[in-house]
Amino acid sequence: MSELRVFDEGDTGAPRVHTRDFGTIQRELGEAGIRFERWEASRVLPPGADQETVLQAYQDSVERLMAERGLRSADVLSMRPDHPQKETARAKFLHEHTHSEDEVRFFVEGQGLFSIHTRGRVFFVLCEQGDLLSVPDGTPHWFDMGPEPHFTVIRLFTDTAGWVARPTGSDIAGRFPRLG
């Protein structure tokens, strides 16, 4: 189940918001300019479905969002606990960074923790199957796939070159808890 915890940026203690209610998560994130939706597949996906099958199952939602936001491409990325480079992949996004375009992710299966630093707060969004999250361009954030990653996501891009992570130089990500 999806979860949101909201902290003041200088306080890693008790969150000011802690909820698993979809409507509350969507409202809190929306007020911060972060898009959060739920999508459903048009068909049942077999285990280990390939990219084409996954994209076809969510074709209507993907095409709607692409048209609405001017996105030009979509792909599918999967990570499993037995991936030989899981530690390197995890470490790559554990530090606060930004992108020059929105980071749009839809969780087909599994989970991941996005931490978004904006408006003097840190929003911890545990995304799970069915969740779409869009972090606006230029918004500081970090992502934790956990020590035993298991997820499949659809990634949507305006230009994959614009998605390069630009470190902020802040140590804030190291002051907050990680996934798992």
Image (cartoon, grey):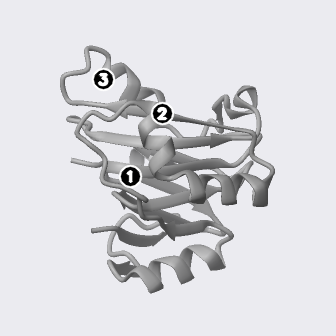
Mark yes or no: residue 145 visible: no
**Callout in the foreground (3, 2):** 2
Choose top left, top right, bottom left or bottom right for residue 61.
bottom right
Pointer 3 residue:
87
Question: Circle 1 sits on which residue?
Answer: 113
State the SS at label 1.
strand
Left or right for 53, reference 48: right
**Distance from label 2 to label 1 (Cα)?**
26 Å
Q: Name above or below for residue 73 compared with residue 64.
A: above
Q: Residue at x 46, y 85 (%)?
A: 23
Q: Are marks 3 and 2 in contact (CB under 8 Å)?
A: no
Please rate how many residues cluster around mark 3, counting C-alpha atoms within 10 Å: few if below 14, some from 14 to 19, many from 20.
some
153 left or right, relative to 160: left
Q: CA distance from mark 3 to mark 2?
A: 27 Å
Q: At which x and y percent is residue 26?
A: 52, 77
Is residue 180 found left or right of 163 in the rendered image? left
Q: Amino acid at mark 2?
A: Glu
Q: Earlier in the sequence, mark 2 or mark 1?
A: 2
What label sits on residue 52 in the rendered view? 2
Sooner in the amino-acid sequence: mark 3 or mark 2: 2
Of pointers 3 and 1, the one earlier in the residue sequence: 3
- Does dot 3 land on a helix, a strand or a loop? helix
